[in-house]
């Protein structure tokens, strides 16, 4: 069972991890997260990043290190990870890696309500989804190929490898579902079942 955390936003976890490298200001954190492609897995914008840093500060996980003045830019506060922040990062990461969590993917919601659409339309829409999945699989493969060409250690692209595995699994599932829905007997039995519910 997931622990109740003072700050539970996945962006907070990314901020804590970035601060293990060195103290930095939120603008720099955001730049690095984007450069590393973490914005594909963690949804954030500039204001949410600053808000999370403030929540982490209030929780005692980060502390202000210094304020930097630059004539070209506004004043910036540099934050550092505290001992409590490091302990929180380690504990949270161990939990996320070791314990499967129940997630609520939107495709699962759509599948749970798929009977609301006519079977033929569902098949057509799922076929469009297959095309979109193929495009995403190709993009993911290209990203991994590029990382390999740059001689990056696999640990630095592990989330892309995971994303590709999920995309492939979803593609297989969707293709199988199209096959099931496309069988004439399936559509007839579903229509009969829905009529009985009326």
Image (spheres, rainbow, N blue to C red):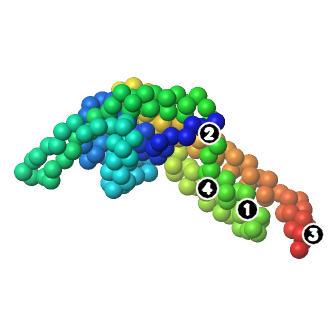
Q: Position of residue 55 (x, y in %)?
A: 38, 47
Residue located at (58% from left, 44% from top)? 167
Q: Position of residue 69 (x, y in %)?
A: 11, 46
The residue that label 4 is drawn on is 106
Q: Nearer the viewer, mark 3 or mark 2?
A: 2
Q: CA distance from mark 2 to mark 1?
A: 24 Å
Q: Check the image and report above or below for 127 versus 34.
A: below
Question: Which label belongs to residue 92?
Answer: none
Q: CA distance from mark 2 to mark 4?
A: 16 Å
Q: CA distance from mark 4 to mark 1?
A: 12 Å
Q: Position of residue 45 (x, y in %)?
A: 36, 55
Q: 136 or 156: nearer the eye?
A: 156
Say whether residue 94 is visible.
yes
The residue that label 2 is drawn on is 101
Q: Residues within 10 Å of mark 3 (few under 14, many from 20)?
A: few
SS at badge 2: loop
Quadrant of the rendering where the N terminus is positioned: top right
Residue located at (36% from left, 27% from top)? 83
Q: Residue furthest bottom?
A: 198
Q: Is residue 123 left or right of residue 99?
A: right
The residue that label 1 is drawn on is 114
SS at badge 3: helix
Q: Is residue 59 left or right of residue 179?
A: left
First along the sequence among labels 2 and 1: 2
First along the sequence among labels 3 and 1: 1
Q: 99 or 123: nearer the eye?
A: 99
Q: Is residue 52 left or right of residue 78?
A: right
Q: Residues within 10 Å of mark 1 (few under 14, many from 20)?
A: few
The residue that label 3 is drawn on is 196
């Amino acid at each position: 069972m997931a622990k109740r955390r003072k700050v539970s936003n996945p962006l907070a976890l990314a901020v804590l991890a970035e601060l293990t490298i060195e103290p930095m200001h939120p603008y720099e954190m955001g730049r690095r997260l984007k450069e590393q492609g973490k914005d594909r897995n963690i949804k954030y914008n500039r204001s949410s990043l600053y808000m999370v840093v403030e929540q982490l500060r209030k929780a005692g996980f980060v502390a202000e290190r210094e304020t930097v003045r630059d004539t070209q830019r506004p004043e910036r506060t540099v934050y550092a990870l505290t001992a409590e922040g490091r302990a929180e990062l380690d504990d949270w990461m161990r939990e996320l890696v070791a314990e499967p969590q129940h997630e609520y993917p939107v495709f699962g919601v759509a599948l749970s309500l798929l009977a609301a659409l006519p079977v033929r339309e569902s098949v057509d829409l799922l076929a469009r989804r297959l095309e979109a999945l193929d495009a995403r699989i190709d993009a993911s493969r290209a990203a991994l190929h590029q990382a390999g060409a740059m001689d990056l250690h696999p640990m630095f692209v592990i989330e892309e490898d995971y994303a590709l595995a999920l995309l492939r699994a979803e593609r297989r599932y969707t293709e199988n579902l199209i096959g099931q829905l496309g069988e004439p007997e399936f559509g007839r039995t579903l229509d009969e079942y829905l009529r009985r519910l009326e």
